[in-house]
Amino acid sequence: MFWKKKKLTYELQQSLQLNTPLQEMSFTVFDTETTGFAIGADDRLIEIGAVQVEGFHVTDRVFQSFVNPLRAIPPVISKLTNIQQSQVDQAPLSLPAIEQYFAFIEENKSGGWVGHHVNFDEMVIKKELGRQNYTFETPTSFDTMHLIRYLDPASEQQDLEDYARIFGTEVFDRHRALGDALTTAYVFTELLKKLDRQGIKTLADLLRIKNGGTHTFVSQS
C-alpha cells in the first residue's frame, strides 16, 4: 500500500507569454531562515520573508512569518539571526505558515520566484511540505547569483551584503528572512537594469540565461 501525496493548489506563477517585457513582470523575492543547514535531516524552518518586485522597482508589499520548528533553536543560530525561541514557540507550524506565504504569492500574481542561492530556500519549502505529505508545482525561479555570474563570469562568489555594496543598494537586517529578501530584491532590480542595457528584455531572454545561455555584450554606443 502507498499514499499519494496531497497537492497544494495555489496559483504560484502567473501564466505569461515568453515575449512579456521584464519591466511588466512581477517577481516574488523570498528568503528563509532555518535551525541549520541539514534540512533533509533534523533542521527546520523558522522564518519566511518575501517582497514583490514590479517594473524594476521594489514594492511595499511584503510578507513575513515566524514558523514553529517544534524543536529548540541552536544558540549559534539564535546569535546569527537574533531569532529567539520565544518568537517561534507561539508561531504557526510550517504548513499554515507556508500556506500564508503561498496566498501572498497568489494575491500578487507573481511571474516567478527570486532568491540568493534560491535552490536552498526552495528545498526548505519542499522538505517542510513533504513532512506533512504535501507537494506543489514549483514555479520558475531565478537566482541572483546566476545572474551575477552571467554578467561577470570571472567574478568570485561573495556574500549578499558585499553584492549590495557593489551595486550601491541598501543592506537590511542580515540573516533575517524579510531583511535578506529585501536586500536581495534591491540587488535583483539592479541586475535587471544591467541586463536590460545588455538586451535582456523579455521573459524568454531571462529564461535563456537560466537555462545556460552565454553572454553576448551589446554596444552601448
Image: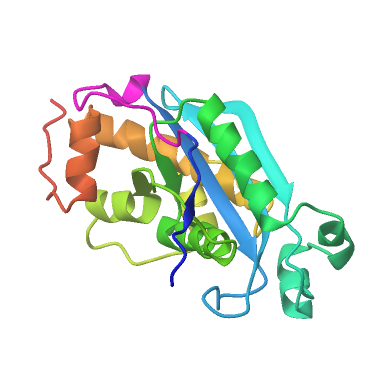
Q: Residue at x 23, y 63 (%)?
A: 154
Q: Residue at x 17, y 30 (%)?
A: 199
Q: Foreground residue, 184 or 64?
A: 64
Rendered location of residue 188, percent (x, y)? 42, 41
Residue 164 vertical position relative to residue 191 in the rendered view, above or below = below
Question: In which quadrant of the rendered view does residue 192 lie?
Answer: top left
Q: Is residue 20 magenta?
A: yes
Q: Is residue 111 left or right of residue 63?
A: left
Task: Report if residue 46 is visible in the image.
Answer: yes
Give the color scheme: rainbow, by chain, secondary structure or one colour.
Answer: rainbow
Rendered location of residue 89, percent (x, y)? 85, 62
Quadrant into which the N terminus falls: bottom left
Q: Is residue 191 left or right of residue 170?
A: left
Q: Residue at x 29, y 25 (%)?
A: 16
What residue span does the magenta drawing correspond to? 11-24
Q: Is residue 31 left or right of residue 191?
A: right
Rendered location of residue 40, percent (x, y)? 51, 76
Q: Foreground residue, 37 or 3?
A: 3
Quadrant into which the C terminus falls: top left
Rendered location of residue 34, percent (x, y)? 64, 66
Residue 20 vertical position relative to residue 198 in the rendered view, above or below = above
Q: Main secondary structure of the magenta part?
A: loop
